[in-house]
Amino acid sequence: MFTIAIHGGAGTLSKSAMTTEKEKAYHTALQAALQAAKIILENGGEALNAVEVAVIGLENCPLFNAGKGAVFNHNGEHELDASIMCGKNNAGGAVAGLKHIANPIALAKMVLQKSQHVMLMGDGAEQFAKENGVELVDQKYFYNEFRYQQWQKIKDENTFALDHSVEIKNPKMGTVGAVAVDVHGNLAAATSTGGMTNKKWGRVGDTSILGAGTYASNATCAVSCTGHGEFFIEQVVAYDVHCLMLYKNLSLQQATEFVVMDKLKKLNAEGGLIAVDKNGNHSLVFNSEGMYRAYFNSNQNKVVSKIY
Ligand code: ASP
């Protein structure tokens, strides 16, 4: 038995802006990323590797606000955050404020496996990348006309917006993530983002914070979040789901729905999360209009991808 679930952000293009072609492109990208991870899991591979591979696939796709599709910050630059966690031993790796790394999630995994630290940021993280043979890319690698136009619309205002929307009144989210339980019963979670359009230089969101945007424990669940990061940090969202299951014996569905549809909603904190538990159940919950998402559960044996 194994399960893998992925997301491409809780801020889908609104239904009115979505075309048949765009919708097809999103489904194709989600299914390709899911498929790459599924192959690992059906061959007995580890959840930690599967979530990394799924997220790399999404980071390499310009449709999502992570890796290649990362948004612009207030200075007209790209700063990327990511984290990964292994449920077997609660080991985590996180990176923040990267400017020259094409696949932040792979660097987060290197921090987990090769560094004595849990979190590295900025120049120090990139120095660590170089020392470990990771090639640095120019900022131009992340250039995307659509994201540039998003930034142009708000760059002179003292505000910031979540991924897809150029309408500040209707902000949208990006970010990508994956959660999995493998045939050995091990869980893992991974999340990666370009953050929010026009965010201040140095702003770090929930994505690189273990317990906020990412969490995994074999005792309960693996969680990857997307949404307005400031709220997700303050509410320690991913860890909250874990705690509700561990201390209160809530099921995965009950815990995730309470956090996203009750707690976050009451705070007007738009977003969602994907989660799997140790029994292979999955939960994909969001309080926004949609959330790019896909999953494969070996019991059901069918790839499912959805947007709204
Ligand atoms: N959570 C991300 C952040 O605040 C944004 C997102 O999910 O789109 O950086």
Image (cartoon, grey):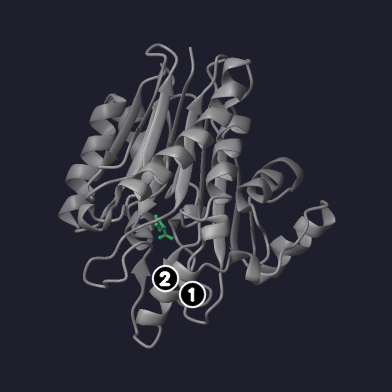
In this view of the protein, can residue 98 be seen by the observer? yes
Disc 2 under 8 Å from ligand 1? The reply is no
Is residue 36 positioned above or below 76 on the image? above
Is residue 126 positioned above or below 152 on the image? above
In-image side of 250 versus 143 (left or right): left
Residue name at image x 55 percent, y 53 percent: 82
Q: Residue 27 in the image: x percent, y percent?
A: 40, 39
In-image side of 267 versus 160 (left or right): left
Quadrant of the rendered image containing residue 125: bottom right
Callout 2 secondary element:
strand
Identify residue for label 2.
197
Q: Label 1 near label 2: C-beta < 8 Å? A: yes
Callout 1 secondary element:
loop
Is residue 154 positioned above or below 238 on the image? below
**Neighbours of disc 2 within 10 Å: few (<14), some (14-19), many (20+):** many
Residue name at image x 48 percent, y 38 percent: 178
Q: In this view of the protein, which residue sits in the foreground, 60 or 158? A: 60
Q: Residue 42 in the image: x percent, y percent?
A: 57, 16
Give the residue type that dot 2 points to.
Answer: Thr
In-image side of 155 versus 284 (left or right): right
In this view of the protein, can residue 198 be seen by the observer? no
Distance from label 2 to label 1 (Cα)? 5 Å
Which is more N-terminal, label 1 or label 2?
Answer: 1
Identify residue for label 1.
73
